[in-house]
Image (cartoon, helix red, strand yellow):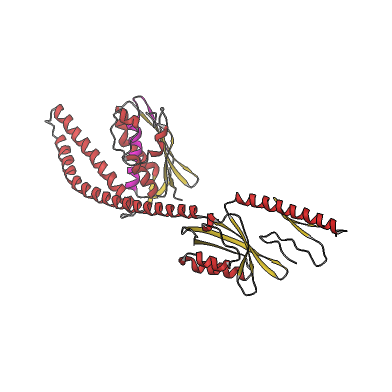
Amino acid sequence: MQVLGTTGRVARSARGSVLLVVGLAQGWRRARLPRPRSARELRRRNAELQADLDHARVSFDRAMSHINDLFWTVEVLPDGSLALDFLSTDASGVVGGNVPEGVDAAAVRARLGHPDDAEANAAFTAAIRAGKRAEVEERLIGFDGVTRWTWSRGKPRREGDRLFFDGVTTNITDRHELDEQREELLKRERQQVAMLEELHRARDDFIALAGHELRTPLTVIQGYAEHLLDDQTLTEEHRHQLEIVVRRAGLMSDLIDDLFDLAKLDSHVEPIEFDPVRLDDLVRDSVAVHEPAAWEAGNIIDLDLEAVIVLGERRRLRRMVDNVIDNAVRYSPSGGKITVGVMQEGDDALIQVADEGIGIPPEEIPHVFDRLIRGSNAIEARIPGTGLGLSSVQAIAEGHGGTALVSGAGPNGTVLTVRLPAAH
């Protein structure tokens, strides 16, 4: 039995029936027609068959002309060569021109294949000859000299003792170009990350140097100022001026400590020493230090403390708590209330500090823990600050395996929650 190829031949079976291959949207279908009774009827039916075949071919070619993929069929001949049996209308999108009829498909692929993809091409051709499913991504240098990335795939089909391979080839040059652009962007991003890491190291080195150079004179200034305050002969004006010096020196010392802690936590050069710490006692001590400033501003601090133990470094945990409470006191208006709570929730220890201050604009909440970033409303209100307090809170909390979160913000205050693993 013969097969319908690119010429649309119709063949008769051994029993004399005619096989009609009609191309429809659902695929090729076969219709077995009854044996004609006369020569005239045979000629009429042959004419009808030819008309149907011509119409099917036109419809098929029209449909294929709207498809960018290249559909093809090769026959694996007994000597191992591959004879092109079918090729869709337009091959220019894949190989830059039409493939001549009757050529050895394997030879054409080998000639058009990119040298760097010769191994992949040979493996694909070998799979076709062996009657196996196969696919390959390779570059083809078209008849027009343009190199295109292609994706070919297909599966074998047998008709009697003849072996065919039906395949489709897609131009995937755009996808590969996008992949290359993505790789280039990733490469640039890695370079930028390396540059940022180098800048961070340089920043930490600068902070360490500047902090070392500033700490000694600040300690001297603060020590002498505190010593002078013990002089009973000081006038009220001189005493007020010395108190300002002591207070400002203390703020500068705290700022340097925050910078040092952030740099050390980032670089992990100084690991945290984990010891049992009574979190409620630590918070109570911190509140006692900040209460005079709160009372002076006309605010009250309400405590709700449960006995909770965490594992951590007391000095750093105390700095974390001081920064949280200091923020609440600083941003609370006169007559406000600050609520400080410590509790255990499951396996976690929670510190919650709520104030009735100016709050945080909702769009700025994602950036409250960024370094050197302060709320726009705090800047407008000319409230002093460095933008490092909450950064330090987050860094210390995360260094202890916990988190820090602003769970409520707006014009009526802020609620800040620090969650740490509780010790059992």
Image quadrant occupied by the N terminus: bottom right
Q: Is residue 53 above or below residue 230?
A: below
- Residue 340 can be seen, yes or no: no
Quadrant position of residue 226: top left
251 or 161, which lies in front?
Answer: 161
Percent of width and height locating residue 201: 28, 52
Predominant SS along the magenta part: helix
Furthest residue in direction bottom, as rendered:
79
Q: Position of residue 381 (x, y in %)?
A: 31, 27
Residue furthest to the top: 335
| Residue 93 image offset from top left, x and y in percent | 53, 54
Magenta stretch holds residue 333: yes
Residue shown at 29% from the left, 50% from the top: 199
In the visual, does 40 lie left or right of 136? right
Q: Residue at x 62, y 75 (%)?
A: 79
The furthest residue to the front: 40
Using the image as rendered, state which of residue 410 and residue 225 is in the foreground.
410
Residue at image coords 37%, 52%: 188
Side (left or right) of 122 relative to 201 = right
Please report the bounds of the magenta region as a residue range. 314-341
